[in-house]
Image (cartoon, helix red, strand yellow):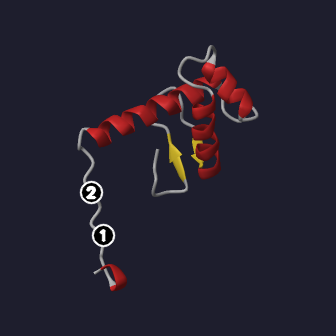
């Protein structure tokens, strides 16, 4: 999932769908609503999204998110080099 762009492409081979910023936001809210122990979680998230993403696309998108978080936690993502100007310098 790309924080910089307005959409992201899943890297999973079984899911090549684009996700808009709005779809990602809805997805994240639904993950919080339907916790890890929810039976048929991916079906429920897909249905709550109006069926615009299949349960398989939702599951793959979640796995990509988990992989991204693990990569960040492991320190394999460099911190951005921000230019500091004005008030904050």
Picture coordinates of residue 51 (x, y %)? Answer: 74, 31
Query: Disc 2 on helix, strand or loop?
Result: loop
Q: Is residue 75 left or right of residue 57?
A: left
Mark 1 neighbour class, 10 Å CA radius: few under 14, some 14 to 19, many 20 or more: few
Q: Residue at x 71, y 35 (%)?
A: 49
Q: Position of residue 41 (x, y in %)?
A: 61, 21
The quadrant the C terminus occupies is bottom left
In the displayed structure, 44 sits above or below 5; it is: above
Q: Is residue 75 above or below residue 84?
A: above
Label drawn at residue 31: none
> Label 1, on which residue?
82
**Residue 33 percent location from the top left of the image:** 63, 31
Mark 2 crowd level (few <14, some 14–19, many ≥20, 10 Å Cα): few
Residue at x 61% of width, y 23% of height: 42
Q: Residue at coordinates 37% horizontally, 33% vertically from top-left?
A: 67
Q: Judge by depth and name the residue closer to the eye, 55 or 13.
A: 55
| Left or right, residue 10 beside residue 25 | left
Indicate left or right for 33 with 88 as reference: right
Residue 68 lies in quadrant? top left
Q: Residue 79 has which mark?
A: 2
């Amino acid at each position: 999932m790309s924080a910089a762009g307005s959409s992201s492409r899943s890297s999973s081979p079984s899911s090549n769908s684009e996700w808009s910023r709005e779809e990602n936001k809805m997805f994240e809210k639904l993950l919080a609503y339907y916790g890890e122990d929810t039976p048929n979680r991916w079906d429920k998230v897909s249905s709550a999204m109006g069926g615009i993403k299949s349960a398989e696309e939702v599951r793959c998108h979640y796995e990509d998110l988990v992989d991204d978080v693990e990569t960040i936690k492991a320190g394999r993502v460099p911190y951005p080099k921000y230019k500091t100007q004005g008030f904050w310098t």
